[in-house]
Amino acid sequence: MRSNVTEYDLIAPATLPAALAALAENPGRYTPIAGGTELMVALSAGRLAQRQLLSLHKLRELRFIDVLPDSITIGAGTTFTDLRKHPVIASDFALLARAGSWLGSIANQNRATIGGNIVNASPAADSPPALLVYEAQVTLVSNRGARTIPYDQFHLSYKKTVLEPGELLFSISLPRRFGAYRSYIRKVGTRNAQAISKIALAGLALISEGKIADIRLGAASLREVPTRCIATEQALLNQTLSPESLPALIASARAALANEVRPIDDIRSTARYRAAVAANLLEEFLRGL
Amino acid sequence: MTSITLTINGERRTVNVPPMKRLLDVLREDLHLTGAKEGCGEGECGSCSVLISRDGGPAELTNSCLVPVLQAEGAQITTIEGLAPADAAKLHPIQQCFLEHGGAQCGICTPGMVLATHHLLAKYPHPTLPQIQEGLAGNLCRCTGYMRIFEAVEAAAGASKAGKPGP
Amino acid sequence: MTTPGPIVGSSPIRKEGLAKVTGRAQYVDDIALPGMWHGATVRSTIARGRITSIAFDPSIPWDEFCIVTAADIPGENTIIHLTKDHPCLAAEHINHPAEPVLLLAHPDKHALHAALAAVRITYEEQPGVFTIEDSEAGAGGDAAKVIWQGDDPKHHSPNTFKTFLMQSGDDPAEHDAALAAAFASADFIVEGEYRTGAQEQLYIENNGVIAEAFRAADGTLESVTVSGSMQCPYYLVHALTLVFGLPAEKCRVIQTETGGAFGGKEDFPSVIGSHAALLAMKCGHPVKITYDRAEDLIATTKRHPSRTRHRTAVSREGKLLAGEIEVVIDGGAYSTLSPVVLSRATIHAPGPYHWPHVTVRARAMATNVAPHGAFRGFGAPQSLFALERHMDKIAKAVGLTPEELRRRNLLGTGMKTATGQLLSDPVDMQGMLTRALTESNYHARRAEFDRMNPASPIKRGIGFATFMHGSGFTGSGERRLNSLVKIELTRDGRPRILVSSTEFGQGTNTILAQVCAQTLRIPYEDVLVAQPDTKIVPNSGPTVASRTAMIVGKLVERASQSLLTLLAPYLTFPDPTADFDYSTACEVPPNYTPADFTRAALSYLKQHGALVAEARYESPGNIFWDDDKYKGEAYPTYAWAVYVAEVAVDTRTYSATVTEFHALQEVGKVIHPVLAKGQIEGGVAQGIGYALYEKCVYVDGLMRNNQMTNYIMPTSADIPPIFVHFDEVPSIHGPSGAKGIGELPMDGPAPAILNAIEHATGISFTEIPLLPEDIFERMTNPGVAHSSRSDEWGTTRGSDGLNATDRDTPSEVTA
């Protein structure tokens, strides 16, 4: 049954400094809420534990996409609709645009923000696999200042992140240097739309003189956090791509992947299925190189 | 309680409600606009769809069950009641096409489906079938199997092409 | 009397369509009554056991709340369906998770959340029985697994709500001998076991009602009124009469606009309606109860899970010689409608084929899950899934194509069904099969897929199912219902149809108005349909069983005819004239205009004050059903169909997708082509969900994926193009020749899809829902059966008489 809304409070500071000040004043008191596509579900279901919330929804400082010659910076308050509409994201970061198109429905994309998708820290979230392979950096802000870290260090464990009390995700930066890479992304969900992923895999690879000169793999729902598949990347790096070498290469990559993933059984799928399909997607990526 | 002013169907309205109250509940309980329905309470079924725009920006399809009303302060909101005046002779072409093509059966998803179509046709005046399928995928219909709805949407797109008042 | 005109067969705008597209239609949660309180249900947190204590946490100001327990029930603590085993509120024993124990009401809806959590119930818990097999163990003598006894041990084994034995032939002993002989001489004996899962109706409007109770001056309860989302107002009247000990005329029920039902609002409104009325009685205010989705999913009915076993004797030529079919359904904790669901499952189990000898044994078993109930198809989708999968298995065993095997066994005009019913109406399943396979380009596609599949990671396949669905109540049901329809004239001379048949999307209002308008020869727009309110509408029966168009439609046609007869003198001379004695009976004039009709109606009303014409069900003389022997005319008539599904199975993700669907059916005269197509397409979409997406995940009897995010119904991006084709063979039983249509499209998709998947993958799947995880397990471990259960019955034969010896048979297919 729905929560009693009279027991909840929501404030909406008009500016980012005001929001950071409110968060700093009493660390841990407020839970930030942006598009509401996660927290409002909990409210409707009667299980929203946080009673005091702080709305980021109208903070213009968080909703931007800055394009520089060698990078793009996306404000955490950017919606998935904003992302999908942006020409540079479509051209340089197609995997992110594609992942954005899978998130919920059009109505959800109109509200959900990339920051919320990251901070909510679901292992099944749609944007992280693409962000991981694009080597995203995330900038965190608080009243004390800002810090920038690689996104692959952001998630600590299930639903735990490096964000400290009073700290907000401010932006996500992606280097514009993957034009020559071949790319792959596929989500396997419970249905074609409005689906939570059972497993998703994003891949980028640079092929040079018949060899895999660089490769990165990002996955959802294979560990307790969105994850780069480092060991599998290592198994593939500098390997020769040829019709003769491919079967052995695929076999070793599948074995490496099986070794580094820790999928689980849950209400949506099984660990065995997730591991097997992840390996199949990896193989599909490699066969397409 | 917080005093919140919104523009609903062109009319400024002020309500005094808890700030976390869902926009859906404010529409239904405080403003007695019951065209938006609750099917799931988790942004999955789209029955509570409304169109929201801010500062003259484009109207965005939104699940009103996921919006704390404070976040809608100052926004312009269109509900199904605002799409066409309460006069049968002046139905919106989308509504007319849903009627003629059997796009409404039990009717509970229909207000949301009509607004999702409105949003879709604003983006793609002549949508392809995949665009229609994507545009309506957040609005679940258990009755029709969607075929009559697709036909209604195509007819509505055709109606606007033919120079009739478009969406 | 009247000749078919342009109204029946055309597609006018649905009667309540304008209100629906403008958002003005009033569903129950859109309605608030003055002084109304809100109700909520305290539910059990265990599946089975005994309540030992109920405590109320003192943090809640309980004096503000109305609290109802079983002790407050003025009449009987039962929700009546067919028996009285189902309590309105659990008084002592708990038999399923989320069972209603007590009810709360408060003026402020927000206050209920904390109060629900503050009612502390302790239990003495007992182990639950959650599977058909465990329930059978109880029935077979394992006392620890006996969870239901019934009120009549003579007629019920433990845990067994109902059993049916249906046998061909007139003499049981002769039949048994003939059956055994057929098996002994068969060229092939083919066995198979098939399972179907629970399925949620997932109407988008959850269950909800508003109740009021009225007291006489001395304080005694005088009457109750319940308004709400429902299919069958008179079912709720019946339930209320027992719970309150009131006569039927003191229990008024009003259907509000209903946002989808599909059977899910057939039996359940009796529960929620009784609950709200109890709260209203006790607190003295109107009380609304509307479930949210999570509660609706854990507490309300679903389609019965099933297990069907086939053992079939077949000749080298592919003729069915004899069959033994065992159908078992999981009824959940209480009997509710399980006996009648089982009945339809039993009668449809042999399908549209000629069986020289067939025995169907069926039973409905008790488990500790919320009672399963009505859902479109009502048992037939379960047993037809099994049969149509099994027919493909037989074809493979015999070495025939699925088409050819069916052609050699399909029923046709003049043949008899398994219940001995002579098919006197024209039945052309051979022609329909030809047409369906042509429309779907079946043979070319099949060949193309066979050619392309080996080199592709996407395996494509095409498959079909041939089936039928009985229109109307089973057996003597319609005779017992004794339905009544009235048509009255309003003060402005317009006909208004008075029926308890409800509109919940299928088009009841529209098609009945079409039938009335056509019969009266007036415009469709002139006909009104009354809101179903038991104070004013007669009992035209429940809105279930594909009976509304055919049975109620026929009654509307007949009532319209009698209205015309009454009006005939006035139609002859519509303008009052002193030269004519209007009491003279006369023929309805061959030509009159709508304006003539109105003038005649007004003249009649002026003279007589009111006009109400009526028609009551009359069983066609040649229909006879023997409930004891389970023989005779099981249904007045059948709708017939051939559905063809095309699928793609991705061997990288193990997901199966339906890529194209053709639905050909013969449903008699199509009253409203647009609505009829919508019925078929919607049913096919639900069938696709049943086959490939919709799984109720139970843990200890409780549905754990009770959210729309996790119970996966198809979106607009999951449904393939659905092509609907009709053959129209008018039937004498329905208005202008219409037959039933509503449930039929639920029966065919699942087996057609799994047959197509077998074509695509070479794997014979036997259980639905078939999720990618299931396909994965079979594709990657050929030895592993679906859900770790044996999918072939050969090694786990039961002890229920189906294990006739087959030692001498030359070939047995159990692989």
Image: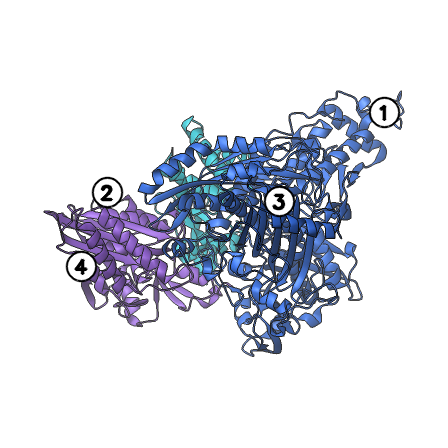
- Give the amino acid type for the residue marked by disc 4 in the picture: Ala
Are the residues under badges 2 and 3 in a single subunit? no
- Give the amino acid type for the residue marked by disc 1 in the picture: Cys
Residue C656 appears at what percent x and percent y? 41, 47
The tag earlier along the polypeptide, 4 or 2, is 2
User: At numbered mark 1, what does the secondary structure look like: helix, strand or loop?
Assistant: loop
Q: Is residue C732 left or right of residue C97?
A: right
The tag earlier along the polypeptide, 3 or 1, is 3
User: At numbered mark 2, what does the secondary structure look like: helix, strand or loop?
Assistant: helix
Nearer mark to the viewer, of 3 and 1: 3
Provide the residue designation for mark 1: C586
Which residue: 36% across, 64% down? A264
Looking at the rendered structure, which numbered label has been put on residue A87?
Answer: 2
Compute the Cα span from label 2 to label 3. Answer: 68 Å
- Chain C drawn colour: blue
Q: Is residue C110 left or right of residue C575?
A: left
Provide the residue designation for mark 4: A235
- Give the amino acid type for the residue marked by disc 3 in the picture: Leu
Q: Chain of mark 2?
A: A
Q: Chain of mark 1?
A: C
Residue B164 appears at what percent x and percent y? 45, 28
